[in-house]
Amino acid sequence: MLDQIDRKKIIFSADDFGVNALASANILQLAKAGKLDRVEVMINASLQKAQALELQATGVKLDIHLHLIDYACDYWQGNRHLERGALKRMLLFVGHYLSGKNSTQKVTARWEDQIKKFKELFGTYPAGIGSHEYIHHFPPYFKIAVGLCEKYKISFLRYGLGNFEHSCLISKILNWLRGQNRQYFKKTNLETSDYLVSFDWTDNLEFITSLPTESRTEVVFHPERAQEFGFLQELN
């Protein structure tokens, strides 16, 4: 099936550069081999400038992976985020927003700080904006992400113009949120893909061969996972 994939129709994106040593090493290897189109960099205390510059030298598009996790938290090395289901994570997320812990003012400040740290590492602002667990699709945060794109002249936003129909709960939630944000996004001049899908929603990419030839789909990978790293290694 891999030999049927048209690379011009797909944006191969890798998330979590900087989240831990394995993720960074695998992403760097894939970027050097020309397997990736975009990489989302997660700003945290363990991310080293030398490592960042080595990734930048590959020429891959560098986006920022905005998040709301404490920089020094051991979350980066553990799997606590995997212990909760999507629904529980969503309820916790909404609770933090309603309580004011993650108010729009606080989120704006934290995300802007991450963008400035990105600039310190790479000497330039990100080419695009995405976020951990797609939280920038939450309408109040979506406006923040758009505003940061405009302020720092960032041209690409992970969004996806059309709905990717899949039974996965996360996909369904994102489709609903996309509808809530569509009119706001139309007022911008930002670039995005035609569709957005994560490899962990489906363990194969057979659907790609049936996409309209004029569309481009951003497919998100987490190369610290053996299956996803292996798939990308086999790309032509």
Image (cartoon, helix red, strand yellow):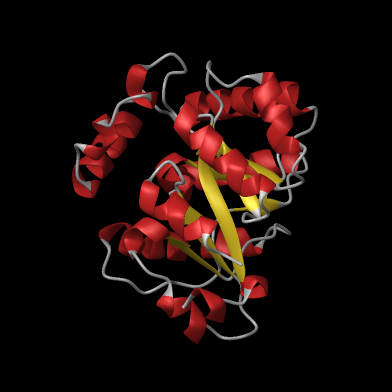
Q: Position of residue 116 (x, y in %)?
A: 69, 24
Residue 197 is situated, as x and y percent measured from the top left of the image, at 45, 63
- Toward which corner of the image does residue 143 lie, by quadrant? top right
Is 228 rendered above or below residue 149?
below
Q: Is residue 157 left or right of residue 219?
A: right
Q: How far from the left and from the top, in percent, is residue 114? A: 60, 26
Q: Nearer the viewer, residue 195 or 135?
A: 195
Q: Residue at image x 56%, y 26%?
A: 43
Q: Nearer the viewer, residue 13 or 158?
A: 13
State whether residue 142 is above or below residue 148.
Answer: below
Residue that appears at 70% across and 57% down? 190
Residue 170 placement, left or right of 163:
left
Which residue is at a point 19% across and 39% down the rendered structure image? 84
Q: Quadrant of residue 228?
A: bottom left
State the quadrant of the C terminus.
bottom right
Q: Would residue 235 be visible to someone looking at this image?
A: yes
Residue 78 in picture, x, y percent from top left: 30, 26
Query: Looking at the picture, does residue 14 appear above or below residue 194?
Result: above
Q: Residue at x 29, y 38 (%)?
A: 94
Left or right: where does residue 3 sit relative to residue 227? right
